[in-house]
Amino acid sequence: MSKRSTITNFTNYPDACGYFGDFGGIYVGETLMTPLLELKSAAGAAFQDEHFWLEYHELLRQYVGRESPCYFAQRLSEHLSNKRKNFVRNSSNDISAKIWLKREDLNHTGAHKVNNTIGQALLARRMGKKKLIAETGAGQHGVATATVAALFGFECRVFMGREDIRRQQPNVQRMELLGAEVVSVNSGTGTLKDAMNETLRYWSEVVNDTFYVVGTVAGPDPYPWMVREFQKVIGEEARRQMLDLAGGLPDCIVAAVGGGSNAIGIFYPFLNDDAVELVGVEAAGKGLATGEHAASINAGSIGVLHGAKSMLLQDQDGQIHEAYSISAGLDYPGIGPEHAFLHDVGRVRYETITDNEALEAFQMLCKFEGIIPALESSHALAQAFKETEKYRTILVCLSGRGDKDLQHVKEILEKK
């Protein structure tokens, strides 16, 4: 009997020790154990406090601009349908799929990240902290953290790899304008993994007055489930909206996965709906065979990174392989433990999309809908195009807008 068949309620995870099945937990040095346990206690108390959630949702409405809409991409759907007819002689085989977009790109700051930083800033204030620190890759989490630091009056320091600083200059400028100090991390390849390493090291020195705002559903307990609780608003809204606008739940939901917060956010309220196919999309980079990718589930193995047990890119000795993706938000050599669990039990299917496929999807959404997506979201779009062969109603988490990626994309397209 498979693990999948023995689970009746996926929303019961994690357990009391922070494990999602075999994945999760706390794997950190003694210095960080106390602040993590304090955070877990504070989060547990806050989540039982009605006033905490009232303030959280009021800020999402009045400051972030939620609800974000579910939008039917009609011209894009028609193009994909017509393109398929050209390859299918018998038109009765044409599924005529409809692509819907959950528009997280319309949030204040331009992505889903602010859902999480609002919640963690409220926790930091509740715990009496004075400073916020964060890691960032694509820069959207750094911008969202700098934004709430300005809103609540915290000091803010954001750690960002040198390569990501080069790729994401607009977001670096935004963070600095918002009053944050952006710290360049020069170790390793200068990307998200290295930024998170440095943030954890720095936090261990300043835990008394500093709150670490983790940007994804990775890291040690309680971060994976805590961030999920702030991001599940995406799926809760989408569920109501699709029932109202499409007349039923979607057949398939697709979301890009780096650490995995936007994906968990939209998947979580649908986990117990067996009829809804859930598809996470990892970055295949230049192709899995090249080794230049960020596909931790499809090409990784079980290990420990950044305080949690999950699926990682590593060698036989446990040394972490550097991840690669055209998208700064996806080139992380691990994945959140809840995603590893959902893959292990067969509830979520994890696919891969290459740089070239993501670039094509990026351009198609611009051309047919007048929406410039983030490169992260473009991976989900590219997979959704493939899902039109099987499903009629496909919902894509458009996790962020592509302003930050324009110069990077321009340089790549000019080279091509």
Image (cartoon, rainbow, N blue to C red):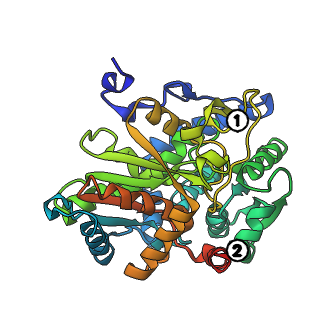
Given residues 260 and 154, the one toward you in this image is: 260
The residue lying toward the viewer, choosing from 235 and 78, is 78
- Please tell me which of labels 2 and 1 falls first in the chain: 2
Check disc 2 and report its element: helix, strand or loop. loop
Point out the image quarter for the C terminus: bottom right
- The answer to whether marks 2 and 1 mark residues whose Cβ atoms lie closer than 8 Å is no
Residue found farthest to the left: 92
- Residue 21 in the image: above or below residue 100: above
List x then y, in percent, for residue 211: 70, 50
Please give the label number shown on residue 111: none
Q: Amino acid at mark 1?
A: Gln
| Amino acid type shown at disc 2 | Leu
The quadrant holding residue 208 is top right
Residue 24, compared with residue 370, is above or below; it is above
Looking at the rendering, in which quadrant would you find the N terminus? top left
Q: Residues within 10 Å of mark 2 (few under 14, many from 20)?
A: some
In space, the residues marked 2 and 1 are separated at their CA atoms by 37 Å
**In this orientation, which residue lies closer to the viewer: 3 or 234?**
3
Q: Position of residue 254 (x, y in %)?
A: 39, 54
Q: Residue at x 73, y 76 (%)?
A: 173
Residue underneath mark 2:
178
Element class at badge 1: loop
Q: Is residue 196 visible?
A: yes
Q: Is residue 345 left or right of residue 377?
A: left
x and y percentages locating residue 28 in the rendered image: 74, 31
Which residue occupies 60% across, 42% down?
218
Q: Which residue is mark 1?
A: 314
| Left or right for 5, reference 370 | left
Quarter of image, res 255? bottom left
